[in-house]
Structures are given as structure tokens and as C-alpha cells.
Amino acid sequence: MVQWSEMSPHQWQEFVNQEVCVTAHEQQQFEGFVFTVDPVSASVVLVTLQEKERPSVRVVLGHAVRDVQILRRGTEETERRLKSVFLPDRAQDLSSEQLKTRRDNLCLWLEKNRIPVTEDGEVLRVANVLTISAPYGSGDCSCANEIILARIQSLVESNPGPEQSQSQTLLP
């Protein structure tokens, strides 16, 4: 049997979104859904989802983990609820029409500033290296290149909005 701390991140990924029972040192047991496993320390982030109470979060340090057993497979609903604990979905506060207006406005702003942008469903793709998800703010940008990320975030933040974007351009 492979020790928890000796498993690979790929093996740990199989536990994410699953309801588990973690046995730690001195036979202490903790139950909850695995939100993530830290790849450096092997620590497990458990979330307990209760119907009428706020979710609770517990971190079981990797060196203390003796065994992890899956109790129940997670569902898409479980995954959505887990993500909402840490990443509140600000797009839920906006109607689909408002999101479309924001997406179209941001596309126009980026194109006006000579940034290549394409729509891929609800996601904007910038030069095939950066994505912008709903609700299309600077915090919704994702990119592996920190320099590109910072520049596009700055441009997104400077977007004047639909009423002024016709007359302003940030870049010369």
C-alpha cells in the first residue's frame, strides 16, 4: 500500500470532489469533501457541506495523513457547491443579457486597443494564450504568462464601459 505522502498529484486528483474519511495520526478521523490536495505538503483541504449551516473547512496536514477512504463519489452539484465556498460566482448576480452586454463591450474594447480576441461560447480568448470568463472583470482573466496577464488585466480595468468605449482608446 502506497503512503499518502508518496502518492503523485495525479493520484491525489482522484480524491478531489469526493466525500472521504481521512485517518490521521493517533487514529483521528475526519470526514468531508476533498476540495484540493496541496502538491507540496500533501495536506488535504476538507469541506463539510451541511444543508442549513455554513460550510466548514478543515486542513489535515499531509504528514499526519495515514489513510484516505472514499465514502461517496461527488457529483457535479457537489463540485459546484465546493467551488462556491471559495470562489463565489459573481456572474450569478447578472442576467444573461447583462453578461452578453459586458462580454460584447469588452470584446469591442480589446479590439479597439488592437488586442486579438475571439469568443468561445461564454469565454473570451485573447491571442490564444489568455481567457476571460464571466462576469468579464480583471479578476476573471486566466493566463500562464504573468506579464501578459498583468497587461490584459490593466486593460480590462481601464474599460470605460459601453457608453464611453466608442470615443476612447487606451493604446496609441
Image (spheres, rainbow, N blue to C red):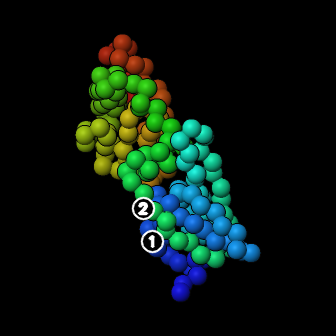
Vertical relation: 15 (above or below) 152:
below
Vertical relation: 141 (above or below) 73:
above
Q: Looking at numbered disc 1 in the image, what kind of residue is underneath it? A: His
In the image shown, does 77 or 6 lie closer to the viewer?
A: 77
At horizontal 35% and vertical 17% (from top left) the residue drawn is 162
Q: Nearer the viewer, mark 1 or mark 2?
A: 2
At horizontal 58% and vertical 82% (from top left) the residue drawn is 3
In the image shown, does 43 or 26 lie closer to the viewer?
A: 26
In the image shown, does 42 or 147 lie closer to the viewer?
A: 42
Residue 124 position by quadrant: top left
Q: Is mark 1 on a helix, strand or loop?
A: helix
Q: Position of residue 128 (x, y in %)?
A: 30, 49
**The C terminus, quarter of image:** top left
Vertical relation: 143 (above or below) 9:
above
Q: Which residue position holds label 2? A: 73
Image disc number at residue 10: 1
Report the side of 93 relative to 44 (left or right).
left
User: In this rendering, does residue 16 appear at all?
Assistant: no
Report the side of 146 relative to 25 (left or right).
left
At horizontal 57% and vertical 38% (from top left) the residue drawn is 52
At horizontal 46% and vertical 58% (from top left) the residue drawn is 17
Image disc number at residue 163: none
Q: Position of residue 96 (x, y in %)?
A: 31, 26
